[in-house]
Amino acid sequence: MSESTTLGWQDSRFAPDVMAADCPSRRILTHITSRWGGLILIALRGEVLRFSEMRRRIAGISERMLAQTLQTLEADGFVLRKAYDVVPPHVEYSLTPLGEEAAEKISELSQWIETNLHRIPGAAG
Amino acid sequence: MSESTTLGWQDSRFAPDVMAADCPSRRILTHITSRWGGLILIALRGEVLRFSEMRRRIAGISERMLAQTLQTLEADGFVLRKAYDVVPPHVEYSLTPLGEEAAEKISELSQWIETNLHRIPGAAG
DNA sequence: TTTCACACTAACATTTTTGTAGGTACTTCC
DNA sequence: GGAAGTACCTACAAAAATGTTAGTGTGAAA
């Protein structure tokens, strides 16, 4: 028996590692850090938004990518989709508790960038 | 004059905003969250690494993408490249203070993913 | 003597990502 | 009556990202 018996899966030999090419954590990381994934999570923080409203807030995203990325994040368990069977269609998107946690992290990154942009040589603004 | 005279650029009308398509902060965000950008920053945290050593640590990255992404991060001011004029070539990569700050943020994200992977439905592991 | 390592670059091929245009079925506004 | 809005999907096309291969010039190890 190893020293930490109750948390056997934390054995470093089996612990998730993004540096490993085929570790599931790498897939999740790419989803969250995909071109639109992060912005969607940020936009949804603490809010319930409809498809079109999100599209307006995230400048430059196409309908196709919004729909596609939302599906990925929903499959991961970060986004909750709630559809009302009415016409015209009404669908509400929000974050799951898990999604809120993830969103907090990329928000911190994007906020750091925004407030430190003037220190970043590679930024023109 | 506005209320906060000494920090005029923080006026919300001019503050950086990743939700704006052409804001420089969006470019920087995509660099850091690019497929390999984040992993490189994470690998370099608190370390001085040579090209080949990095390539070994970041499983799956090709020479081309490592070189290319390093150049982008160097231009942004996150990575420092130090070349010694010897043969065979010897080049050392490290993070600038700015890079360490950025790396800390994505590290927090990736660590959150690694430790919470078991809660993420979309992950097979 | 052959092989490997080093830190890349350039050309080319492929894969992935992203965009565009059109369609759906119905309602409300003008 | 026509346009716009809703939440998408599906083909198709274009663009971007990424991979593959080959090559550089030398030194050290097998």
Image: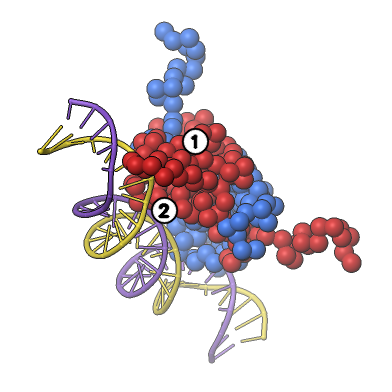
Chain colours: A red, B blue, C purple, D yellow
Give the image location of residue B32, x and y in percent: 50, 47
Residue, disc 1:
A48
Residue at 44% across, 51% down: A69
Residue B95 in the figure: left or right of residue A4 = left
Looking at the image, can residue A110 be seen? no
Which quadrant does the C terminus of chain A fall into? top left
Give the image location of residue B122, x and y in percent: 57, 58
Residue at 36% across, 36% down: A56
- Is C16 rendered above or below residue A67? below
Q: Secondary structure at mark 2?
A: helix
Looking at the image, can residue A75 be seen? yes
Which quadrant does the N terminus of chain A fall into? bottom right
Q: Are marks 2 and 1 on the same chain?
A: yes
Q: Chain of mark 1?
A: A
Q: Secondary structure at mark 1?
A: loop
Q: Nearer the viewer, residue B29 or A8?
A: A8
Q: Nearer the viewer, residue A32 or A21?
A: A32
Amino acid type shown at disc 1 = Val
Amino acid type shown at disc 2 = Gln
Give the image location of residue A96, x and y in percent: 58, 43
Residue at 51% across, 34% down: A47
Residue at 33% across, 41% down: A88
Q: Nearer the viewer, residue B115 or A93?
A: A93
State how far apart marks 2 and 1 are (Cα). Answer: 18 Å
Q: Residues within 10 Å of mark 1 (few under 14, many from 20)?
A: some
Residue, disc 2:
A68
Q: Quadrant of residue C16?
A: bottom left
Q: Quadrant of residue A108?
A: top right
Give the image location of residue A122, x and y in percent: 44, 40
- Is C2 rendered above or below residue B16? below
Residue C22 in the figure: left or right of residue A47 = left
